[in-house]
Amino acid sequence: MPVRKIPRSYQNVTGLIATNKSDQLTAYESGLEYCCQKLIGFNLNILKYEEQPVRIYYSNGDGKLRHYTPDILATYRNDVAPAKYWKPLLIEVKYRSTLCEKWHELKPKFQAARQHAKDQGLEFAILTEREIYTPYLNNAIFLIDFRWLPVNEAYTDLLLETLNELHETTPQALLFTITQDRQKMGEMLPFLWQLVANHVIGVNLEEPLTMTSRIWSTLWLGKDAVYEPLHQLRRGRSRQIRWQAIRYYPPLGS
């Protein structure tokens, strides 16, 4: 249950978002928070999240007691590696311009949040548009609704069997290998994207997703059939923590 209700605003983008990772509609009070929640919803490592999760009390040195509420608390799954080894993540979402303009005001809040996270066995991270506004976001927003389509087993089996034979190809070439009937191609395409959305078909989501993107069978671990951005994204402890909230790449061989 949120400890703070997000008010309506005529200056900021506010609203509610439906997700399968919360028991209720979750609120956001900026376009950046909306996009961050979309990425969290797409991340299969995250079990659940809540917005405005805790009120943290602190003093900035003048003796007055103040409070601060981070934006999101994300909890990871405990049944898959490496997510089961990660601490829950307390997240603040801010535009970089706001961080620069109001750093003197925000710094005590963030220091209090880091100490609270340490005391409670959590991690704390600040996410900005640099991490959020990326091709990965566009791909996640496009793909996420395909997850909820009813599965068409006949089309799914045909797509995977053909891709396993080809090892790697493109969406356009995969469909053309199966049929030259454009109507059939159109019928199969949503289920191809469903397989991509569920990471059954591999693709580099750090690049814009098109009909000519390179895709591969995750059952075929050839020298090029790897999730290229994975090692790059995990460099550095603080960077790794930030990416854990908004990036998902399945372990190789999973």
Image: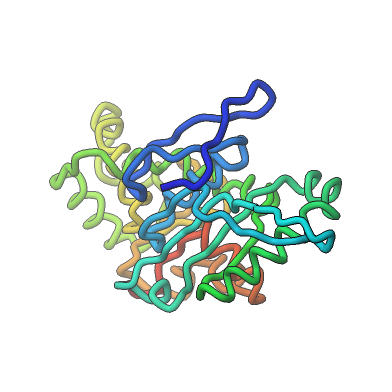
Q: Is residue 20 visible?
A: yes
Q: Position of residue 157 (x, y in %)?
A: 18, 52
Res 232 quadrant in image = bottom right
The residue positioned 38% from the left and 59% from the top of the image is 44
In the rendered view, would you say 1 is above or below 81? above
Q: Position of residue 197 (x, y in %)?
A: 37, 49
Q: Position of residue 101 (x, y in %)?
A: 86, 46
In the rendered view, would you say 185 is above or below 54? above
Res 118 quadrant in image = bottom right
Closer to the camera in the image, 221 or 132 = 132
In the rendered view, would you say 128 is above or below 123? above
Closer to the camera in the image, 71 or 61 = 61
Q: Is residue 78 left or right of residue 12?
A: left
Q: Position of residue 21 (x, y in %)?
A: 36, 50
Q: Residue furthest left?
A: 154
The residue positioned 77% from the left and 54% from the top of the image is 106
Quadrant for the C terminus, please.
Answer: bottom left
Q: Is residue 128 left or right of residue 145?
A: right
Q: Residue furthest top?
A: 10
The figure's colour scheme reads rainbow
The residue positioned 19% from the left and 39% from the top of the image is 150
In the rendered view, would you say 12 is above or below 174? above
Res 24 quadrant in image = top left
How many marks are shown on the rendered structure? 0
The residue positioned 60% from the left and 51% from the top of the image is 69
Q: Is residue 176 visible?
A: no
